[in-house]
Image (cartoon, helix red, strand yellow):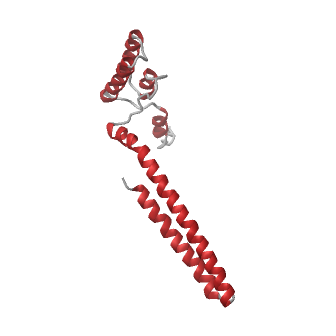
């Protein structure tokens, strides 16, 4: 008797894993406990609630259980490391700097585009329409605009 086996679904295990919650380790549980203690010191948790949430956090096996211990608390643990916290503290200054660079670039681009349009119209009025003018002005406008915006993007991405 011949027995036919069903083909193995290679993506089945991946689909199963994607629906399973991510496991957490001692490091994540300790960080969650520290976060809970901070909220207790700041007066957001009572002693009983702290004890209950600490038990939940320290017994957590996956990220869902860990997040449930920190639910309804402001700035709850999101797995951020100290470097991410320092970056977040610098971000308001960086955001203002990037906005200033973006506004300056936009103003410069508007003046450049207006100047190119005036020069193009003056060229057409003085020399009449020609293939050279119809090709050179748009290509020059596009090339300088592209250089201006990519340079601005490079300046905004610097630390």
Between 13 and 78, the residue placed more toward the observer is 78
Count the numbered circles shown: 0
Between 70 and 83, the residue placed more toward the observer is 83
Instruction: From the top left corner, tell me how far across and down residue 8 is, in percent.
Output: 48, 41
Residue 131 visible in the shown view: yes
The residue at 35%/20% (across/down) is: 37
The residue at 39%/19% (across/down) is: 42
The residue at 51%/69% (across/down) is: 146
Instruction: From the top left corner, tell me how far across and down residue 39 is, in percent.
Output: 39, 21
110 lies left or right of 46:
right
* Res. 31 image quadrant: top left
The residue at 49%/52% (across/down) is: 99
> On screen, 67 above or below 93?
above
Between 125 and 147, the residue placed more toward the observer is 125
> On screen, 82 above or below 63?
below
Instruction: From the top left corner, tell me how far across and down residue 107 is, in percent.
Output: 55, 63
Residue 129 visible in the shown view: no
């Amino acid at each position: 008797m011949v027995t036919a086996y069903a083909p193995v679904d290679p993506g089945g295990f991946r689909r199963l894993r994607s629906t399973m919650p991510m496991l957490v380790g001692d490091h994540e549980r300790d960080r969650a406990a520290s976060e809970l203690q901070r909220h207790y010191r700041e007066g957001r948790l009572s002693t009983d609630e702290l004890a209950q949430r600490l038990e939940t956090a320290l017994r957590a096996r996956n990220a869902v259980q860990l997040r449930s211990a920190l639910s309804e608390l402001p700035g709850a643990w999101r797995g951020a490391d100290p470097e991410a916290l320092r970056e977040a503290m610098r971000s308001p200054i960086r955001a203002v700097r990037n906005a200033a660079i973006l506004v300056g670039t936009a103003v410069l681009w508007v003046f450049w585009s207006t100047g190119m349009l005036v020069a193009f119209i003056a060229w057409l009025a003085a020399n009449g329409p020609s293939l050279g003018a119809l090709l050179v002005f748009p290509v020059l406008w596009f090339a300088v605009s592209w250089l201006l915006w990519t340079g601005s993007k490079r300046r905004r991405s610097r630390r």
